[in-house]
Image: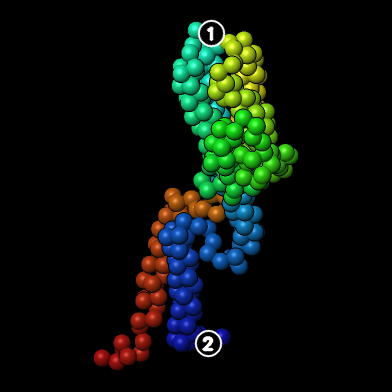
Amino acid sequence: MRVTQTMLTQTNLKHLSSSYNTLARVQEQLISGKRIQKASEDPVVAMQGIRYRTEVREVDQFRRNVSEATSWMDMTDSTLNEVTEAVKRIRELTTQAANDTYESSQRAIIKSEVDQLIEHIGSLANSKAGEKYIYNGTKTDQPLIDIDQLKAYLANPTGSVDSIYESGTAPAASGKIEFEVSKGINVQVNMQPETVFGKELFEGLHKLSTLLNDPATGGADLSAELDTLDTLGQNLITERAELGARANRLELVDNRLQDHEIIAKTIMSDNEDIDVEKVIMELKSHETVHRAALSAGARIIQPTLLDFLR
């Protein structure tokens, strides 16, 4: 078969074009840091990459849920601590007022502070995490306590405790708020208002305020209320203990999610990312071959009949 100059030129250009494509592919890998730029280059790597990315996004979402749940629980624990301290202070004041040597004017001063503490407890019942009320069950857009009605209730010895609630009645079975913190794992983040700020708390405090306002109240009557305050304080401690148990579990879940995120991102990187040193070596190798091909092509293509007709 006769080999012409045109055939040599076309073959040389064909192989040079292939070499340019190889150099371009390796350069794209080095610039992007990824093995493939299109799914068609390696469908298996592309499909695995989609699965790993979905897993990483899922873990990221779970960690955001854990962060929000932790914030909610931290705010809940902080307010419960303030309520517990307020009840302790009320108990101290009640112990002082139970002293029969206290005059009515002195008890009036104690009643004034007790009422302020009760109003403070009412305001704590309306605490928010972000824009959500944390003590009104699933009604996170509504406060639990009407503070004006609470003040009126304290001033009225025969008032109804239901009037202090925004809904017009004491909460009951208000519902749980749960966050999904891992596949199939939901953690309750809220405290039930009926167990923390229920009728028993405000009725007990209202009775104490009424007794302090009555001149006929004796020290024994006030001393009898100390047991009620102790019960209320113990209930708050129990609720905080339950909240602490949930918070500890949430911390364990978060630690596991951190490990899972590291593993998932490592696997995704192994699947998609290049070995930089290896790619640089490959680029240098292809560049050397390409330069050699250019040099060889120049020697073959350059001599023509015109070069000898001088």
Mark 2 vs 1: CB contact within 8 A: no
Disc 2 marks a residue whose amino acid type is: Arg
- Helix, strand or loop for disc 1: loop
Percent position of residue 63, x then y: 57, 43
- Reply above or below: 304 against 246: below
Cα distance between the residues tagged 2 and 1 = 129 Å
Snapshot quadrant of residue 252: top right
Does label 2 or label 1 sit earlier along the sequence?
2
Quadrant of the drawing holding the N terminus: bottom right
- Helix, strand or loop for disc 2: loop
Residue drawn at point x = 50 percent, y = 57 percent? 34
- Reply above or below: 99 against 71: above
Front in this rendered view, residue 77 or 167: 167
Percent position of residue 145, x then y: 59, 40
Mark 1 Cα-neighbour bin, 10 Å: few <14, some 14–19, many ≥20: few
Mark 2 Cα-neighbour bin, 10 Å: few <14, some 14–19, many ≥20: few
Q: Which residue is denoted by mark 1 in the rendering?
A: 100
Disc 1 marks a residue whose amino acid type is: Asp
Asked if one can make out residue 226 in the rendered structure from this viewpoint, the answer is no
Q: Which residue is denoted by mark 2 in the rendering?
A: 2
Query: Which mark, by number, is residue 142?
Result: none
Residue drawn at point x = 45 percent, y = 51 percent? 276
Quadrant of the drawing holding the C terminus: bottom left
- Reply above or below: 168 against 100: below
